[in-house]
Image (spheres, rainbow, N blue to C red):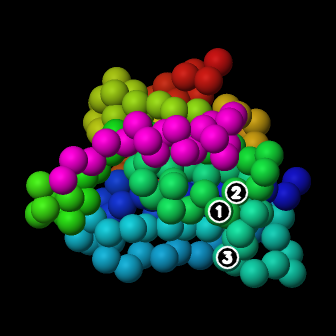
Amino acid sequence: MKCDILITGTGGQGTVLASRLLAASALEAGFFTRTSETIGMAQRGGCVTSHVRIDSLNKNPLIPSGSADLIIGFEPSEVVRELHRLTPSGKCIVNTRAIQPVTASLTGKSYDPEPMFDYIKKYAPESIFVDGMTLARQAGSVKTLNVVLIGIAWATGIIPVKAQLIKDCMAKMVKPKFVDMNCKAFDIGAAYIK
Protein backbone atom coordinates (compact mmCIF):
# COMPACT_ATOMS: atom_id res chain seq x y z
CA MET A 1 0.00 0.00 0.00
CA LYS A 2 1.62 3.24 -1.18
CA CYS A 3 1.83 5.94 1.44
CA ASP A 4 3.76 9.22 1.29
CA ILE A 5 4.19 10.94 4.65
CA LEU A 6 5.83 14.31 5.23
CA ILE A 7 6.96 15.11 8.76
CA THR A 8 7.74 18.74 9.49
CA GLY A 9 8.64 20.83 12.50
CA THR A 10 11.55 22.65 14.07
CA GLY A 11 14.88 21.45 15.41
CA GLY A 12 14.69 19.60 18.71
CA GLN A 13 11.08 18.41 18.40
CA GLY A 14 11.92 14.82 17.46
CA THR A 15 10.92 14.91 13.80
CA VAL A 16 13.96 12.93 12.65
CA LEU A 17 13.32 10.12 15.14
CA ALA A 18 9.66 10.07 14.06
CA SER A 19 10.61 9.62 10.39
CA ARG A 20 13.16 6.93 11.20
CA LEU A 21 10.61 5.10 13.33
CA LEU A 22 8.04 5.11 10.53
CA ALA A 23 10.61 4.04 7.95
CA ALA A 24 12.00 1.23 10.10
CA SER A 25 8.48 -0.03 10.84
CA ALA A 26 7.55 -0.01 7.15
CA LEU A 27 10.75 -1.87 6.24
CA GLU A 28 10.04 -4.49 8.93
CA ALA A 29 6.53 -4.87 7.48
CA GLY A 30 8.09 -5.70 4.10
CA PHE A 31 7.57 -2.43 2.26
CA PHE A 32 10.25 -0.89 0.08
CA THR A 33 10.70 2.44 1.83
CA ARG A 34 12.70 5.58 1.07
CA THR A 35 13.40 8.51 3.34
CA SER A 36 15.05 11.88 3.04
CA GLU A 37 15.62 14.67 5.53
CA THR A 38 16.21 18.39 5.26
CA ILE A 39 17.79 19.38 8.54
CA GLY A 40 19.49 22.71 7.86
CA MET A 41 19.57 24.89 10.95
CA ALA A 42 17.83 22.27 13.08
CA GLN A 43 20.00 22.76 16.14
CA ARG A 44 18.96 26.41 16.26
CA GLY A 45 15.22 25.77 16.02
CA GLY A 46 15.16 25.94 12.24
CA CYS A 47 12.91 24.03 9.86
CA VAL A 48 13.24 20.24 9.77
CA THR A 49 11.40 18.24 7.12
CA SER A 50 11.49 14.48 6.60
CA HIS A 51 10.01 12.53 3.71
CA VAL A 52 8.89 8.92 4.25
CA ARG A 53 7.76 7.09 1.12
CA ILE A 54 6.31 3.66 1.86
CA ASP A 55 6.08 1.20 -1.05
CA SER A 56 8.25 3.52 -3.12
CA LEU A 57 10.26 1.32 -5.48
CA ASN A 58 11.46 3.34 -8.49
CA LYS A 59 10.51 6.65 -6.86
CA ASN A 60 12.53 9.65 -5.77
CA PRO A 61 12.97 9.86 -1.96
CA LEU A 62 11.54 13.40 -1.99
CA ILE A 63 7.76 13.74 -2.04
CA PRO A 64 6.79 15.99 -4.96
CA SER A 65 4.15 18.72 -4.74
CA GLY A 66 0.63 17.34 -4.61
CA SER A 67 1.70 13.80 -3.61
CA ALA A 68 1.77 13.53 0.20
CA ASP A 69 -1.03 11.46 1.69
CA LEU A 70 -0.29 12.79 5.17
CA ILE A 71 1.57 15.70 6.74
CA ILE A 72 2.50 15.29 10.38
CA GLY A 73 3.15 18.81 11.62
CA PHE A 74 4.94 19.48 14.86
CA GLU A 75 4.50 23.24 14.39
CA PRO A 76 1.66 25.05 12.51
CA SER A 77 3.74 27.39 10.35
CA GLU A 78 5.84 24.47 9.13
CA VAL A 79 2.64 22.71 8.00
CA VAL A 80 1.63 25.82 6.06
CA ARG A 81 5.10 25.92 4.47
CA GLU A 82 4.74 22.32 3.22
CA LEU A 83 1.01 22.26 2.42
CA HIS A 84 1.72 22.37 -1.32
CA ARG A 85 2.99 18.79 -1.07
CA LEU A 86 -0.39 17.40 0.11
CA THR A 87 -2.71 15.54 -2.26
CA PRO A 88 -6.19 17.09 -2.68
CA SER A 89 -7.59 14.27 -0.52
CA GLY A 90 -4.68 14.33 1.95
CA LYS A 91 -4.83 14.93 5.66
CA CYS A 92 -2.72 16.91 8.13
CA ILE A 93 -2.10 16.20 11.77
CA VAL A 94 -1.19 19.52 13.33
CA ASN A 95 0.27 20.08 16.77
CA THR A 96 -1.41 23.33 17.81
CA ARG A 97 1.42 24.59 20.02
CA ALA A 98 3.18 27.23 17.97
CA ILE A 99 6.86 27.99 18.42
CA GLN A 100 7.51 31.67 17.94
CA PRO A 101 10.26 32.20 15.36
CA VAL A 102 13.29 34.27 16.28
CA THR A 103 12.32 36.95 13.74
CA ALA A 104 9.01 37.55 15.53
CA SER A 105 10.77 37.66 18.89
CA LEU A 106 13.36 40.17 17.70
CA THR A 107 10.86 42.49 16.04
CA GLY A 108 8.26 42.28 18.80
CA LYS A 109 5.60 41.14 16.33
CA SER A 110 2.88 38.80 17.48
CA TYR A 111 2.75 35.23 16.28
CA ASP A 112 -0.86 34.07 16.13
CA PRO A 113 -1.38 30.52 14.84
CA GLU A 114 -5.16 30.92 14.28
CA PRO A 115 -4.85 32.29 10.71
CA MET A 116 -2.60 29.32 9.93
CA PHE A 117 -5.21 26.90 11.26
CA ASP A 118 -7.83 28.55 9.01
CA TYR A 119 -5.51 28.26 6.00
CA ILE A 120 -4.81 24.58 6.68
CA LYS A 121 -8.55 23.85 7.14
CA LYS A 122 -9.28 25.55 3.83
CA TYR A 123 -6.89 23.35 1.86
CA ALA A 124 -7.06 20.18 3.98
CA PRO A 125 -10.53 20.12 5.58
CA GLU A 126 -10.07 16.67 7.15
CA SER A 127 -7.05 17.79 9.14
CA ILE A 128 -6.70 16.90 12.79
CA PHE A 129 -5.64 19.63 15.24
CA VAL A 130 -4.28 18.48 18.58
CA ASP A 131 -2.47 19.92 21.57
CA GLY A 132 0.20 17.25 21.36
CA MET A 133 2.24 18.73 24.20
CA THR A 134 -0.57 18.10 26.69
CA LEU A 135 -0.90 14.51 25.51
CA ALA A 136 2.88 14.05 25.71
CA ARG A 137 2.84 15.30 29.32
CA GLN A 138 0.20 12.66 30.08
CA ALA A 139 2.65 10.06 28.79
CA GLY A 140 5.34 11.35 31.12
CA SER A 141 7.42 13.82 29.10
CA VAL A 142 6.98 16.52 26.46
CA LYS A 143 9.82 14.76 24.62
CA THR A 144 7.32 12.08 23.58
CA LEU A 145 5.46 14.55 21.34
CA ASN A 146 6.86 12.79 18.27
CA VAL A 147 5.48 9.41 19.34
CA VAL A 148 2.11 10.90 20.32
CA LEU A 149 1.79 12.32 16.80
CA ILE A 150 2.85 8.97 15.28
CA GLY A 151 0.11 7.29 17.35
CA ILE A 152 -2.46 9.75 16.03
CA ALA A 153 -1.21 9.23 12.47
CA TRP A 154 -1.40 5.45 12.86
CA ALA A 155 -4.98 5.65 14.16
CA THR A 156 -6.11 7.46 11.00
CA GLY A 157 -5.51 4.21 9.08
CA ILE A 158 -3.15 5.85 6.58
CA ILE A 159 -0.02 4.09 7.85
CA PRO A 160 -0.05 0.47 6.60
CA VAL A 161 1.86 -0.98 9.58
CA LYS A 162 0.60 -2.75 12.71
CA ALA A 163 0.85 -0.86 15.98
CA GLN A 164 2.88 -3.59 17.66
CA LEU A 165 5.47 -3.47 14.90
CA ILE A 166 5.87 0.28 15.44
CA LYS A 167 6.31 -0.32 19.18
CA ASP A 168 8.83 -3.11 18.54
CA CYS A 169 10.88 -0.82 16.31
CA MET A 170 10.63 1.95 18.88
CA ALA A 171 12.03 -0.41 21.53
CA LYS A 172 15.15 -0.76 19.36
CA MET A 173 15.50 2.99 18.78
CA VAL A 174 15.09 4.56 22.24
CA LYS A 175 16.95 3.91 25.46
CA PRO A 176 15.45 0.98 27.41
CA LYS A 177 14.37 3.20 30.33
CA PHE A 178 12.19 5.25 27.93
CA VAL A 179 10.49 2.39 26.05
CA ASP A 180 7.43 2.09 28.32
CA MET A 181 6.87 5.85 28.34
CA ASN A 182 7.05 6.00 24.54
CA CYS A 183 4.68 3.04 24.16
CA LYS A 184 2.27 4.87 26.46
CA ALA A 185 2.67 8.01 24.31
CA PHE A 186 1.83 6.02 21.18
CA ASP A 187 -1.28 4.57 22.85
CA ILE A 188 -2.41 8.01 24.07
CA GLY A 189 -2.05 9.37 20.53
CA ALA A 190 -3.93 6.43 19.01
CA ALA A 191 -6.71 6.78 21.60
CA TYR A 192 -7.08 10.48 20.77
CA ILE A 193 -8.61 9.53 17.40
CA LYS A 194 -10.81 6.75 18.75
Residue ID at (34%, 35%): 133
The answer for how far apart the CA atoms under marks 3 and 1 are is: 13 Å
Location of residue 21 (image quadrant): bottom right
Residue density around tag 3, few if under 14, some if 14–19, many if 20 or more, within 10 Å: some
Rendered location of residue 124, percent (x, y)? 67, 43
Secondary structure at numbered mark 2: strand
Q: Which mark is residue 84?
A: 1
Residue ID at (40%, 31%): 131
- In this view, 143 is above or below 139: below
User: Which amino acid does the dot numbered 1 rest on?
Assistant: His
Task: Give the labeled residue for mark 2.
Answer: 86
Q: Nearer the viewer, residue 121 or 181?
A: 121
- In this view, 96 is above or below 30: above
- In this view, 173 is above or below 153: below
Residue ID at (57%, 21%): 191
Location of residue 14 (image quadrant): bottom left
Secondary structure at numbered mark 1: helix
Secondary structure at numbered mark 3: loop
User: Which amino acid does the dot numbered 3 rest on?
Assistant: Leu
